[in-house]
């Protein structure tokens, strides 16, 4: 499918309706040129290759499908993903994997600010750095960062767990470094293997919620 | 939401193509800003001792501009050079800026002064980017660098004067994606120093604040650091001076930007889709500017 010849709407209608009928298992998308909403809302056992840079919300709401962006991704790549895999070969802009419920998002380069904001079960593996406010209010799932993290990492975390190999500029409210268990090392090792990143899982720090913001504390006088 | 584009060509041989390279960039930002568009371009300079004034009037009557030229020459006893394109005129004079400003304000109050400078020309108007490009023939512009803007207003009116880029002082322009929450307190502060505002637009406050800092002795970097303290709100700023193109994003970096660089050019846009049509973009080095860092590119041979 050549996006210089067909519209994003036509492409997505094909991916949603005609693909399954035709039994197609692989779709190649050329000339994405930063268009928004490429391959959103997929619900099929298909692999999709986007040959170039994608705009906002690429592969958003993905279910089952495996989407690879052979370039950079704009804001909100794989936002609200349910399952399947989304891989970005370049860098990803803000809010990558936001509110993702499941599946795996792999970003080979850096991810910008607010990566994994409000994630709800997705696994995110970033080969480079993540920007500030990443994993803000993250509820479930895992984030593995092979590079460094910016300010306020994991502010107001719930049950999601973050693993960072490099430096963390600052932790957000109620996020704390905790001891890596054997279970953590195995989990990180499995995710690194899945992403194809050759790092030792033992080099990562575990960041999780200190659970001091979990319950309303009338004595805290709003001094959090 | 608004769209930003910036372009600096590195080789003088490419100056003639600046406008043509810019057109698909500006049109690429139509969805981010369909209601007004503008461009500030650094072109061949006025002669030594002269300044260029870019003017806008709500008329396309050629006689209006001819009348302005005639009255100016008669009243001030000084011959101006005037070139016009529809609503837009470029007036070149060696008289003091305040003399020219005051005279225009008194005799042609309907004329809006878009810019003052040796090299700076500004075109801005309501309409889609494609309409504004066609109206002023922006594809034919020549020069070393430019900043452009497509507007979707979130505050203040939609008029040509409220469109971006804004200018202050001489040869300084700024375009903005975002919203400043405290423009009026910034204005009140500056008005004490005799600084005049043309509109109630938030970006104009930011533009005049930065120019005032630089006029008071700060370099651009120090002025931008003061912005982080003084300006409340969201912003990605693109700025132009006679020999520089500069970019900065606020600490929260909610407003996007992406930069592409080749041996021939540096191109900036809110989104990659405005860069996709540039020559050799497939081999360009691309990056997303990080928050609170000032990026500056200098025109070769102009520093």
Image (tube, coloured by chain):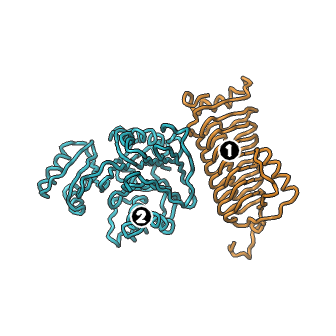
Circle 2 — which element? helix
Q: Chain of mark 1?
A: A
> Depth-wise, is mark 1 or mark 2 nearer the camera?
2
Which mark identifies residue A186?
Answer: none
Chain that is coloured cyan in the picture: B
Residue B157 seen in the figure? yes
Q: Residues within 10 Å of mark 1 (few under 14, many from 20)?
A: many
Find residue B49 and report its image quarter: bottom left
Q: Residue at x 66, y 48 (%)?
A: A109
Q: Is residue B136 above or below residue A185?
A: above
Identify the secondary structure beneath mark 1: loop
Pinpoint the chain carrying mark 2.
B
Q: Position of residue A44 (x, y in %)?
A: 74, 33
Q: Which mark is residue A78?
A: 1
Q: Residue at horizontal 68%, vertical 65%?
A: A170
Residue B166 in sight in this render: no
Q: Where does the image place residue B290, in percent across and percent down from the top left?
A: 57, 56
Question: Spatial distance from mark 1 to mark 2, Cα to Cα?
Answer: 38 Å
Asked if residue B169 lies left or right of residue B35, the reply is left
Q: Position of residue A28 (x, y in %)?
A: 66, 30
**Above or below: residue A199 compared with residue B188:** above
**Which of the labelled discs sits on residue B210, or is there none?**
2
Give whichever of A62, B110 is nearer the camera. Answer: A62
């Amino acid at each position: 499918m050549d996006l210089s010849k067909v519209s994003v709407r036509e492409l997505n209608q094909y991916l949603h309706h005609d693909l399954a009928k035709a039994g197609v298992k692989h779709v190649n998308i050329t000339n994405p040129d930063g268009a928004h909403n490429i391959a959103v809302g997929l619900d099929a056992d298909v692999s999709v290759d986007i040959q170039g840079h994608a705009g906002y919300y690429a592969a958003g709401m993905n279910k089952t499908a495996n989407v690879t962006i052979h370039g950079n991704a704009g804001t909100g790549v794989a936002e609200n993903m349910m399952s399947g895999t989304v891989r970005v070969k370049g860098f990803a802009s803000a809010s990558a994997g936001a509110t993702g419920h499941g599946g795996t998002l792999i970003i080979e380069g850096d991810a910008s600010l607010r990566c994994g904001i409000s994630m709800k079960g997705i696994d995110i593996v970033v080969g480079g750095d993540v920007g500030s406010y990443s994993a803000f209010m993250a509820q479930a799932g895992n984030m593995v960062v092979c590079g460094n993290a910016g300010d306020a990492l994991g502010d107001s975390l719930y049950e999601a767990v973050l693993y960072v190999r490099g430096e963390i500029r600052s932790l957000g409210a109620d996020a704390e470094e905790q001891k890596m268990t054997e279970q953590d090392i195995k989990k990180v090792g499995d995710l690194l293997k899945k992403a194809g990143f050759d790092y030792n899982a033992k080099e990562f720090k575990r960041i999780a919620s200190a659970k001091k913001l979990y319950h309303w504390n009338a004595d805290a006088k709003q001094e959090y | 939401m608004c769209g930003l584009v910036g372009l600096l060509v590195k080789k003088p041989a490419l100056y003639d193509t600046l406008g043509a390279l810019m057109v698909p960039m500006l049109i690429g930002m139509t969805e981010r800003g369909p209601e007004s568009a503008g461009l500030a371009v650094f072109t061949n300079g006025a002669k030594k001792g002269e300044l260029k004034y870019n003017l806008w009037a709500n008329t396309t009557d050629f006689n209006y501009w001819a009348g302005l030229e005639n009255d100016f020459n008669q009243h001030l006893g000084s011959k101006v050079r005037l070139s016009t394109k529809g609503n837009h005129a470029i007036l070149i004079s060696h008289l003091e800026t305040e003399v020219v400003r005051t005279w225009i304000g008194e005799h042609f109050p309907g004329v809006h002064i878009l810019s003052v400078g040796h090299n700076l020309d500004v075109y801005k108007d309501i309409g889609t980017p494609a309409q504004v490009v066609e109206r002023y023939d922006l594809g034919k512009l020549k020069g070393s660098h430019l900043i452009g803007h497509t507007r979707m207003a979130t505050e203040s009116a939609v008029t040509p004067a409220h469109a971006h880029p804004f200018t202050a002082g001489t040869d300084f322009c700024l375009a903005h994606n975002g919203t400043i929450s405290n423009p009026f307190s910034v204005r009140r502060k500056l008005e004490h120093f005799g600084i005049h505002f043309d509109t109630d637009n938030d970006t104009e406050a930011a533009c005049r604040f930065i120019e005032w800092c630089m006029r008071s002795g700060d370099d651009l970097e120090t002025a931008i650091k003061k912005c982080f303290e003084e300006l409340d709100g969201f912003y990605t700023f693109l700025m132009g001076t006679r020999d520089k193109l500069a970019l900065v994003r606020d600490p929260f970096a909610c407003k996007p930007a992406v930069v592409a660089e080749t041996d021939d050019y540096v191109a900036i846009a809110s989104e990659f889709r405005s860069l996709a049509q540039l020559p050799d973009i497939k081999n360009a080095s691309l990056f997303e500017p990080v928050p609170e860092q000032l990026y500056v590119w200098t025109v070769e041979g102009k520093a």
